[in-house]
Amino acid sequence: MATFDDFQKLDMRVGEITKVEEFPKARKPAYKLWVDFGEEIGIKQSSAQITDCGKQVIGVVNFPPIKVADFSSEVLVMGTYSEQGAVLIEPQQRVKKGDRLG
């Protein structure tokens, strides 16, 4: 079972999707994403089943990068898998890029 101390190790921030490209080399249908997490973190790459450019999202920014086909995914964009497909977790209102989830 995870502890509260484990949870506190995660650095979850608000970012804005700034660029989306098709990703035909991914095993599961996905897109390449570029997410801007503000001045401190900068722009990071991810891969997900979403295409919502301009949307603010929550991402875990302190996981090590993983390779998805020939693409380096540097953050984990948070969402749910539902009957509607992938649904992003996002702030209720626009906030500053890089704000921490806590």
Image (spheres, rainbow, N blue to C red):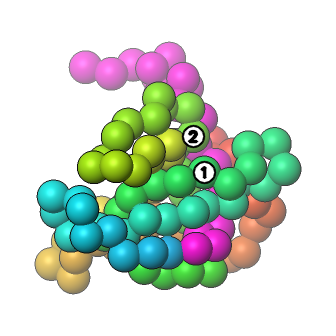
Identify the amino acid type marked 1.
Lys
Tell me what residue is drawn at x 15 percent, y 58 percent: 27
Percent across and percent down for residue 75 are 50, 45
The reply to whether dot 2 and dot 1 touch (C-beta < 8 Å) is yes
- Membership of 14 in magenta stretch: yes
Percent across and percent down for residue 96 are 80, 62
Percent across and percent down for residue 53 are 55, 80
User: In which quarter of the view is residue 12 placed?
Assistant: top right
Percent across and percent down for residue 34 are 57, 63
User: In which quarter of the view is residue 62 placed?
Assistant: top right
Mark 2 or mark 1, earlier in chain: 1
CA distance separating discs 2 and 1: 8 Å
Q: Is residue 32 above or below residue 92?
A: above
Name the image quarter holding the C terminus.
Answer: top right
**Residues rendered magenta in the picture:** 1-19
Tell me what residue is drawn at x 35 percent, y 63 percent: 48
Q: Which residue is mark 2?
A: 61
Identify the amino acid type marked 2.
Val
Farthest-out residue, right: 39
Tell me what residue is drawn at x 39 percent, y 58 percent: 47
Image position of 75 (left or right of 92): left
Q: Which residue is mark 1?
A: 44
Q: Which mark is residue 69?
A: none
